[in-house]
Structures are given as structure tokens and as C-alpha cells.
Image (cartoon, rainbow, N blue to C red):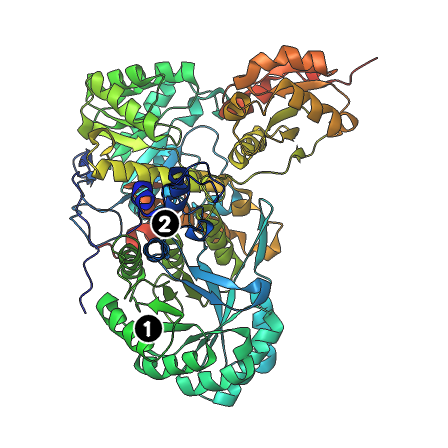
Amino acid sequence: MTIPSAARCYPGRILSVTLPAAPGGTPVTVGGQNALPLVPEGDRPHRAAVGMEVGTGVCEPPPSLARAVENREKDPVSFAKACVEEWGAQFLFLSLSGCHPDGGGQTVSLGARILREVLTAVPCPVIVGGCGEEEIDAKLFPAVAEAAPRPVFLSYADEKNYRLVGGAAMAYGHGVVSWSPIDINMAKQINLLLSDIGVPAGRILIDPLTGGLGYGLEYTFSIVERIRLAGLGGDGMLALPVLCHLGDAWKAREAVEVSEPSWGDVVVRGRRWEEATGWACLAAGADLLVCRHPENVAAFRGMAWR
Amino acid sequence: MALTALEIYKLLPKTNCKDCGFPTCLAFAMQLAGGKEKIEKCEHASEEAKQTLGAASAPPLPKVLVGTGDRTVTLGDEVVLFRHEKTFYHPTAIAVSVSDALSEETLRERVRGISALSFERVGQALSVDLVAVRCESGDPARFAAAAASALATGGKPLLLVGPCAVLEAAVGVAGTSRPLLCPPPEETGNGARLAASGKLPLVVRARGIEGLAKALAIARTAGATDLVADPMSADALQAVADSVFIRRLAITHRAREIAYPTAFDLGQGFPQPFAAACLLVSKYGSLLVLDTADPAEIFPILTLRQNLFTDPQRPIQVEPGIYPIGKVTPSSPVLVTTNFSLTYFTVRSDVESAKTPAYLLIAECDGMSVLTAWAAGKFTAESIARILTESGIAEQVGHRTLILPGMVARLSGKIEELAPWRVLVGPQESSALPSYLRRLPPAAFAAAHG
């Protein structure tokens, strides 16, 4: 009896995107595949990349996570070094959350200075995140785009600010993370808008908004599957690598609650909560994961990817 | 392959007699194509039509039942490869193992521990589905006693893992509970005969998809009908690749010889069992056997399963009512939103991160988000005024100030007309709630006078 091969061929291919590094660092290249994740079909020149999130300003990780990062998250520069040198992060997501009035109210120039210091301290690729406050980000993105001594990715461009973020990125040779709220049409729209103002597709990553385990992860799972199927189906504006933030997993009560003994040890549970979120994102098609727990960097990188 | 509505229409009498309850034969054909009706509803259909449609509508992946009564576990019976195409119907079953080498008391304790793996989320109870009894003693009497004890203590359906000689002994004591038999790969034929004689479901194990197809044929020849396929994958990535290919062969290629629910034994030294479990829940595993009974690992796996097996067309809803967040007092702010679970959880987590205790009122909106529910006429000034008076929130707070989602700001005037409450228009996006709440003057929620 002969069983037909279940491997499929797709008309499209995901574009390769490189996150550049400084001399001495290793650039991260993702995408390039014409295959669905985890199955032996087509070819897949690059593995999924695993990074870590570095915050600025007021950082209050849940206690079990704070212990895992040895309470070193307070100083972004030394924390960035630990993420890369000790915990194996291939890239960093530097969230300039400290510039938010509720996150410490740091000035835009302080945010830019922290970015410069991090970029000097570690040679790995860096994605810079805004603070989430529209008016401040409108000043922050141009400032960090100018201050960065080497190419980074700016996160994120959405429906409202794509001109500003895309423009800042183009002026200084950076890449852009395009963000949409679990909406495939919007994801395509932002990429089209960025292309229209001249951002090359090879410098765009898709952030589809990642819900944590138990809190909307299924919507992210399906939207990432749909984006990937559309990209492999030949839709160039969706044939781009997908980035998933696992940080939302730590907002789940189930991940951090200490007073529920029947839920098991919170130290194990919190880490597993983030890890389960990450495996589901990888199964759906994510190309880049941003973790907060050092051991999960090892778990995702340690898989014997073929 | 599934037939299209037009192909089905050609097989129908085309008389539009309405006896099936639909206005036209084409309308009925569309229902058949969608799998929502059965051809039997048409009394006038020809035998040929019934046969053609019967074969086409047979599920691409057969259904296998394990256990009896309300604890019955259903494996397989899926129709799509991606949940957004329709939905997944039968969640990945999780079995946790016990060894028959344990002393009687230790075994009972372990089974009680497995039964205790039960968690409540969004109004649903999540629990482990089966107890897997592994034969490590080699002793038929001991294995049978362990199976009987696991069944009596846990009440869950059993997966019996061991050579045919011990399985036979266990079937003698636990056969009426419809256990799933799992003999070693070299005993497929004998195992299939045992399963056939007791009309029991059987796991067929063989390495790789080709080998599995051969072993499944042996089991069918021996008379076993309810089969589950275990490709004996060596690691997590092999397992997920096998799982995806078997499911694709079933759904896309209709390759009946391999179209069975799948089982993966992630115990006994399987590398990275947690990762493998998450990947297989994400990608089509029908049954997973785990050696761990640690709630810190089982809870996230069961939650992932709950997420992915939610019907994407029917979102999980939250019970309407009052949800206090944090240490609320009579002067805590009151917010209102809809009962779409994602809306609720988003707003809840944003209020939590504001660290401002607050009451969240959830209105009945058929599980729609704020804007959708407003557009559908479910989240209206009338329904919000009703929940303000009927929920009893007025007895819990001293003030009469409601924070309305910014998306439906236009409702504020009408709400104030209908209920003795003042309305503050909150932010458009829930993510802005933390700073919004922190900037609210406390005077806004001082006790109402007069």
C-alpha cells in the first residue's frame, strides 16, 4: 500500500528579513520559508528566533519572574547584557515604557540615551518599542531613530502613526514592526501603507497582537495561521515574518497567583504559562518570540529544530 | 471529497416539494453541503442519491469512543485542518499514567491526585480525561487489580498499556467500562483480536506513517474497528510532523487507510514532554499520555486546549453581573462593558493593572464586543440602564457615576435620561484605562446626596 505524501507546495514564500547586529554580534534572519511551521515540507532556511524583553522605568515583574531574572531588571543596560550573554537571547526588545507618565515619566532624551547605552553594551539586534502614549511616542520615535548609532527596528507602526514611524525608520535606515489588533485585513493594510510611503518589505515584521494563554491566545493562534496561509498563498503584503510577544502570559492571574495551592508551584506554573503561549505561537507560524523568562529562551532555542 | 451544494442539488428530485421543510431543493442542498442536515429528510431522494451523499458525508476522520456514560471521551471526528475554517469539535484527550508496580495504597493516592487535577476557567471545568495504567509488573493479576482500582478510585475511562496477556486479564475486570487497549507494536494482531472480541477501542502502534498504515490494516483484518493510531514518534518535532501529516491525509487526501485519531505517549522518558504536549494540542493530537501529574504543568496544557477548541464562531461568554476587581469600597468606580469573554478579560486586566479597585458591570450582549454589540442593538442605553437597576450595583456603591466605554460615548445622554446615574465617557481603548482611572478625581465617586 502506498500512502501519498502529505507535504504541500505553496505558490508563495515568506520574505527573509534580517535584523542587523553590530560588529561582533550575530544578525538574526527569519522568514524565507515556503512551508507551514513544524512540518517537513518545502524549505526553511532559518529557524524561529528567540529574544527577550528589556523594560525601562518602573519594572514590576511578578515575584516568580523577578526571581528568575535575579532582580536585575531594574537597570536596562546590565539587564540587556544578562539577557544576551547569560540567557541566550538572540535579539532584544527594548521597551521604552519608562517614557510613559505611568511608567516613570522619563524624558524622550533619556529614552534615547538608554537606547544608545544598550546598543553600545550589546552587539545583538534590537527592536525598540514605544511607550504606548500617542503624543509621547510621536516625539520618541523620531528621537530614537536619530539617536540609534546602528540600524534597529521600531515598534510599532499602526494605522494612526505609520507615517511617523515609517518615515523615521526610512530616514535613518531602520526597520519597522507593523502592528494590528488581531485583524488580518488591518495587518495587510498597514503593510500596504508602509510600502506606499517607501518602507521596503524586507524591513517589515508583523506584530499581530499576542494574547496570553487563557486570555485570547486562540485569536492570535488563528490570525497567525491565516496570515501565514495568505502569505504562502501568494499575498506579498502578508508574506512577512511574524513576531509574537509572550509578555501577556504574565498578566494572567493563573500565571502569578500564589494563594492557589491546587494550581501547583507558582514558580513552575508561571514559566510554563509563558512557555505554552510560545509553543502555540510557534505552531501557528510565529518567526520571532519575545520572552520574559530566561529558561524559556533556552526551551525554545533548545528544541532540535530541523 | 465533500460535495458542493450544486453537485448535491443535481442528485435531488428538484421538485421543490418542501416536504423536507426547506422552500426549495437548492436550499436543502445548501444545508446538506454545510453538514447541517441529513439526506434522510428528503423522502423522495433516490437510492443512488442516498448512497452518494452517505459516502461523501462520512466523516473524514472516524470517531472513536472511550469509556461509558457521561465520562465518555470522544477521539477524532474532525472535519477541518484549521480552526478558522469551521471549528475543532473534540478536544485533545489527556491521560495521566499510573504504574501497576505501585503498592495498592500509593496507586490509589496517585489516581486521587489525577482526579484532583481539575480547574475552573470562564465557567468551564477543565480536567484530565483518562487514567493510563501502565504494566510494569508483567503480572496479569496485578495489572487487572491495578486497572480495577484505578477505575473505582478515579471513575475516569482507562487506557490500558501492556502486553496482550495482561490486557486480557484487565479486560476481564474492567472491560465493561470500555477501556482503550494499547498493546505493544509487536502484538498488533493479538491485541486487535482481543479488542474485536470485547468490541473495545484499540491503539495501534508502529513507527512512521507507512508502518502505521500496515499495522492498521493488520488490526482491521483481525476484526478491530475502533482504532487509534500511534506513530511512536521519537521526539516533539517528529510527533508534530506525524500528527500534521496524518490529519492532512485524513482531511485533504481522504486516505482512509491512515485516517484515524492519533495517540502519543509522552511519558517514559520522552524528551521535552511539556513542549510536545503544547505542540500536539495545537496541532491535531487526539490523545496524549503524560507521566506528570503536576498541576503547574497540567493546568497550562488544559488551558491551551480550552483556548484552541473554543468554537471561533461562538465566543465564550462571561456571566452578566457585577465583578468586583481588587479591594472595592462603596466609593470605587463602576465601569460597564459587554459579556464577550475577550472584552471582559481585557478590561479586567487593564483595571487590575491600574491598581484602582473598581466594579465591572457585565451586560448580556450575546458574547459580542462593545462596538459589535452596539451595532447589533444589544449594548444600548436601555440595556445599560436595565443592568444599573437590576444588578443591585446601587446597593454596593454610594455614588451614582458610571464609566462608559468611549466607543459608545453617544449613549451617555440617553442613559442619564433612563437611570438616575451620571455617565463619564471612558477611553476608546481599554488599554488607556490604567491612566484614565488613576487620573479620575476621587470626588467623582463620592457618595451621592439627596
B265 over B105 or under it: above or below: above
Determine whether, in the image, residue B426 is placed left or right of residue B5: right
- In the rendered view, tell whether residue B122 sits above or below residue B191: above
Chain identifier of the residue bearing label 1 in the image: B
Q: Are marks 1 and 2 on the same chain?
A: no
State the residue at coordinates (33%, 75%).
B220
Q: Is residue B120 left or right of residue A176?
A: right
Q: Nearer the viewer, residue B217 or A284?
A: B217
**Label 2: few (<14), some or many (≥20) within 10 Å?**
many
In the image, what residue occupies the spot 19% across and 35% down? A234
Q: Is residue A245 visible?
A: no
Q: Residue at x 44, y 82 (%)?
A: B197
Q: Residue furthest right?
A: B450
Q: Position of residue A256 (x, y in %)?
A: 54, 45
The quarter of the displayed image where residue A15 is located: top left
Residue type, mark 2 in image: Trp
Give me the chain letter of mark 2.
A
Q: Which mark is residue B314?
A: none
Which residue is identified by label 2? Answer: A279
Residue at mark 1:
B205
Q: Position of residue A105 (x, y in %)?
A: 47, 20
Q: Give x and y (percent) for residue B412.
A: 62, 13
Q: Are dots 1 and 2 in contact, CB under 8 Å? A: no
